[in-house]
Amino acid sequence: MRKIVFVTGNKGKFREVRDILAVKGYEVIQNTDGYPEIQEDDLEPIAAFGARWVAHKLEMPAIVDDSGLFIDVLGGFPGPYSAFVEKKLGNKRVLKIMEGESDRNAVFKCVIGYCDPGSEPLTFTGAVKGTIAFEEQGAGGFGYDPIFDHNGITFGELKYEEKNKVSHRRRALDKFLEWLENRE
Ligand code: IMP
């Protein structure tokens, strides 16, 4: 089994990435040491910088996941600041900000950054469209899952395997796997 190190302190992300890649014969090892997150409006440069930094430091093929929730009517906020907003405000206060808004469209984006030691990084982006629910629904998943409605059901209400079939993370990993398989 080929090993890839995944640097993340987020258990939800790790579990999803590990399980999706395991089916394809990759063993994903978690490393929680972190990496410098540069400040950018887009996720791609953040993921590319992180993957390169980690692969060069650990001298192993490495992935990082930079993801976030982009709410249309808020100009894409919280976007790259999703982890910070989740920690400081939480879902209930995000719902308060959305009170009275009829345009509830949002996009979950996930960028997988991958780098081999001594190489330049690559990024693979996955996105899924949905709407911000009016209240939290479901206790599954993590982060914004209970307020992200996808086809009438929140990610928090979906079974774990069902979220993994349609999520932004799944879409990004599918692109990454296609690239890996073509290069082998
Ligand atoms: P970062 O990629 O570590 O900067 O943080 C991404 C943040 O976006 C997470 O801490 C969550 O708040 C949110 N997020 C990313 N992916 C998901 C997901 O699949 N479900 C729910 N929230 C997510």
Image (cartoon, rainbow, N blue to C red):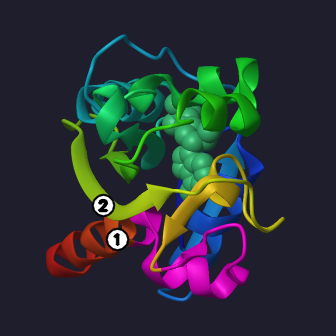
Tag 2: residue type? Gly
Asked if 150 appears above or below 111 in the picture, the reply is below
| Residue at screen point 42% across, 49% down | 61
Residue marked by disc 1: 171
Residue 31, given in percent of the width and then of the height, sits at 69, 40
Marks 2 and 1: in contact by CB < 8 Å? yes
Q: Quadrant of the C terminus?
A: bottom left
Tag 1: residue type? Arg
Q: Quadrant of residue 16?
A: bottom right
- Residue at the outermost right position: 139
Would residue 32 be seen by someone viewing this image from the given angle? no
If you read the primary sequence from the N terminus, does the residue marked by circle 1 or circle 2 appear first? Answer: 2
| Residue at screen point 55% across, 78% down | 164
- Disc 1 to disc 2, how far (Cα)? 5 Å
How many numbered marks have been drawn onto this rendered protein structure? 2
Q: Judge from the rendering whether residue 171 lies leftward or rightward of residue 31; answer left or right.
A: left
Would residue 126 be seen by someone viewing this image from the given angle? yes
Q: Judge from the rendering whether residue 129 lies leftward or rightward of residue 136; answer left or right.
A: left
Residue 179, given in percent of the width and then of the height, sits at 20, 70
Of 147 and 118, the residue lying toward us? 147
Asked if 23 appears above or below 144 in the picture, the reply is below
Q: Quadrant of residue 14?
A: bottom right
Residue marked by disc 2: 126
Q: Which residues are magenta?
A: 152-170
Q: Is mark 1 within 8 Å of ligand 1?
A: no
Taking the magenta stretch, the answer to whether it contains residue 123 is: no
